[in-house]
Image (spheres, rainbow, N blue to C red):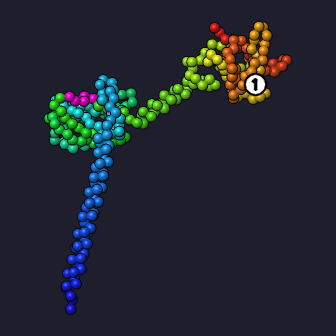
Amino acid sequence: MFNTRYLRAGVGAFALMAASLAPSASFAADQNAQRGTHLSGQWQNAPAVVTRGADGTVIYLYGETQPTVVCSPLQLCEIALQAGEAVRDVLVGDTVRWQVEPASSGSPEGPRIHLVVKPAKAGLKTSMVVTTSRRTYHINLESRSSGYMARVAFSYPEDIRQQIAAVNQQIQDSIIPGAGVAAENLNFNFSISGNARWKPSRIYTDGMKTYIQFPGHLGSGDAPILFVQSGGQNQIVNYRLNNNMMIVDYLIDRAVLVNGVGNQQQRITIRRRG
């Protein structure tokens, strides 16, 4: 005969074990939820570096925080997206009391989308998610009876990096080989006369040294000898070669570069003007 007493005892033990596990699982889920909301809040409430752009535009750095756009009833808030960026969806938490309409403008970089935001009354708060062809925007919306942001836009980390790289490249391009300083700090006021296959392409000075740049790499047999003209005499001076650069450790006024002998000799005359 089946003993129901043991069955009831087993069911009771299982129920007790399940009851003991349920609070533990619920507690872990609550901890995860609290940790998740805390981490999200750290980003949402992080202080943002807000700058002023052209025509009073409030500019947020994209991705730094969840920006807040403050609007006012009977006024229009304009949120400008990046030029060439196509909007996929605009989702607003409160679609009854907040109205968002798209507008567009042209720019050299391509068409630009603007989101025009209008609240029904003051004292409202909601959030908006905008998905585009390039990124997703998370924006807080807040309405006040007075004071609002007429124009809001974003700066983008990738654009900033490109601008910095362009400036660095411009600086690098302005550095003249050998001297290692920008061209505006050098004096190129030298004349070069004569014919030779190794005729210098450029001569300049930083006020202390003279740099003679040749059109190509000079081997030991191709390098001319530099004579400085002083008191009607040609004097050999010390210099050093660095690839296609001849560096003289002082400022020269008149000099001659000589390579070869006899009928095969080639000469280039250098004069500093002024």
Q: Is residue 183 visible?
A: yes
Which quadrant is the N terminus positioned in? bottom left
Q: Examine the rendered structure and indicate whether residue 43 appears above or below residue 108.
A: below
- Quadrant of the rendered image containing residue 59: top left
Eyeballing the image, is 68 above or below 211? below
User: Residue 77, how many percent across, how many down?
Assistant: 23, 31
From the viewer's perspective, is 258 left or right of 182? Answer: right
The residue under the point 29% across, 48% down is 38
Kindly give the residue lying farthest to the right in the view shown.
262
Read off the residue under disc 1: 223
Q: Which residues are magenta?
A: 147-151
Residue type, mark 1 in image? Ala
| Quadrant of the rendering where the C terminus is positioned | top right
Q: Nearer the viewer, residue 31 or 232?
A: 31
Q: Residue, x 68% and y 17% (percent of image)?
A: 250
Residue at (25, 61) in percent of width and height: 26
**Percent of width and height locating residue 147:** 20, 28
Q: Of residues 131 and 236, which is closer to you in this image?
A: 236
* Nearer to the camera, 104 or 37: 37
Residue 137 can be seen in this image? no
Furthest toward the bottom, the residue is: 1
Query: Could you tell me residue 175's position as x and y percent?
Result: 57, 25
Which quadrant holds residue 52?
A: top left
Q: Residues within 10 Å of mark 1 (few under 14, many from 20)?
A: some
Asked if residue 174 is among those painted magenta in the image, a careful observer would answer: no
Q: Is residue 81 left or right of residue 188?
A: left
Where does residue 90 sit, x and y in percent of width and height? 26, 41
The residue sitting at 32% across, 35% down in the picture is 48
